[in-house]
Amino acid sequence: MATTDSTSGMDPNARRLDRRSLLRMVASPVVVLTLLTTLLGIMYLDYVVDPEQNLHDFPIALVNQDVGETMGPPDQQRRVNFGDQVADGLSKAVPADKIDLRVLGITEAERQLQSGKVYGAIIIPSDFSKRLGILGVGSVVPGDIEQPMITLQTNPRMGAYASSIVIHVGDQAFPQVNKQVGEELTRQVQSQLTPPEGGQAPELSGATRIALASPLQLIVEQYHPLPNNTGQGLTAFFYALLLLLAGVIGSMTIHTMVDAALGFVPTEYGPWYVHFPPTPISRFKTLLIKWGVMILAGNVVSLIYLLVAKGLDMPIDDPFSLFVYGAFAIIAVGITGLSILAAIGSAGLLVNLILFIVLGLPSSGGTVPIEATPKYFGWLAHFEPMHQVFLAVRSILYFDANWAAGLARGFWMTLAGLIIGLVLGAVVTRYYDYKGLHRGSSARAAA
């Protein structure tokens, strides 16, 4: 084998470094690094700089349970439903281009909250009009009264940032709705005042008008709060990230170490340099060995992650499902990564980094909801591995491994990625072998 000894001079067979080679050696990594960091800057800053401006199709449920109330003097009674007015006011106050306000029944709203289909819910209670009527009467007749309440429920299992967006939407829309209901209630109360004979109805006092102008109270509460040690809903994201990293780093490590053991690349440990003679083995069989190592490593790493999480008191209701899916995700990512490396060589390191990490993290929806990022992130989320793994892990950790909450999509998309990786690796390496593009010394010399 050819080696270079800096103390005794250059090997006569070694290639000389001329000016053109030096320029290419310097320029190539600078260009690659420039392009990669430009992509990193765009992806990682664009999705977090202004989530409110990027908000689109953000799903929130609107539940109107109000049954209405009969109001007015005995001879002028009429049926009113303030809940309908509030629902209509909310629909107008909430920007339709940003918020997907879904008018649902309470049962369907709870189902969508439990399956992660909505980020929150606005609930108008069944006695809403009745309580407003009591407030109207109580404003002019002595007695104890309570403000009617509208409940704004957040879904903390969808992430702390998503909950803050729901609260922000409620805070923006509520004053307008409160004012609208207050004006209608004031007219209702004024019309019920009995005028003296031959006179006009008495005017409402200033204090009464103030009380009626803002009759509603907004109550914010969490739907199915998260237990402790969940990082306010971030443990699912970071656990999914760990699975992706294990697959990506595992594929790079296995690819390099197996190639070194087979003599296709040298191994250096500090000043020690080892380069074994190349092993006469086909590309396809080499890839099969790497896949086998990846399958073994995936199960070991998934078990380690599970034990570490349990050791840190992270709540895991279904550890078996988390272990099985974790191993499945690591193996799928690792096998696909190995196939890409087998297909395009060292350039596969960059491709794997971009595919699984650079594009995957901001489009995962784990920190900032997809609906609060630029729309092209939503397009990426349809196929990016990180998003699929995150949905599955979040379902296992926070939604009782509910298939409708993302586990089904995560499983099938992970399976699809695994199949793509297997087919890609098998087809490309078999083709290279068929063409005689072996990795022996003759191939290296020709290169």
Image (cartoon, rainbow, N blue to C red):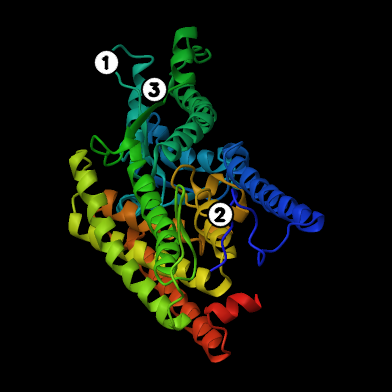
Q: Earlier in the sequence, mark 1 or mark 3?
A: 3
- Residue 86 screen position, x and y as percent: 47, 38
Q: Secondary structure at mark 2?
A: loop
- Mark 3 crowdedness (10 Å alpha carbons): few <14, some 14-19, many ≥20: many
Residue drawn at x 55%, y 40% as measured from the top left: 94
Front disc: 2 or 1: 2
**C-alpha span from label 2 to label 1:** 59 Å
On the question of residue 64 being in view, the answer is: no
Q: Nearer the viewer, mark 2 or mark 3?
A: 2
Q: Earlier in the sequence, mark 2 or mark 1?
A: 1
User: Any mark on residue 359, and which?
Assistant: 2
Residue 280 is left or right of residue 143, and the answer is right
Residue furthest right in the image: 19
For the residue pair 85 and 187, the one nearer the viewer reads as 85
Q: Nearer the viewer, mark 1 or mark 3?
A: 1
**Up/down of 301 relative to 430, above or below:** above
Query: In this view of the protein, which residue sits in the foreground, 31 or 120?
Result: 31
- CA separation in Å, label 2 and label 3: 56 Å
Amino acid under disc 2: Leu
Give the labeled residue for mark 3. 136
Asked if residue 282 is positioned above or below residue 190 in the image, the reply reads: below
The amino acid type of the residue labelled 1 equals: Asp
| Residue 379 at x, y percent in the picture | 58, 60
Q: Are marks 2 and 3 in contact (CB under 8 Å)?
A: no
Q: Name the residue located 75 percent from the left edge and 51 percent from the top edge.
A: 27
Residue named by callout 1: 144
- Identity of the amino acid at label 3? Gly
Horizontal and vertical percent position of residue 249: 42, 56
Q: Residues within 10 Å of mark 1 (few under 14, many from 20)?
A: few
Q: Nearer the viewer, residue 39 or 80?
A: 39
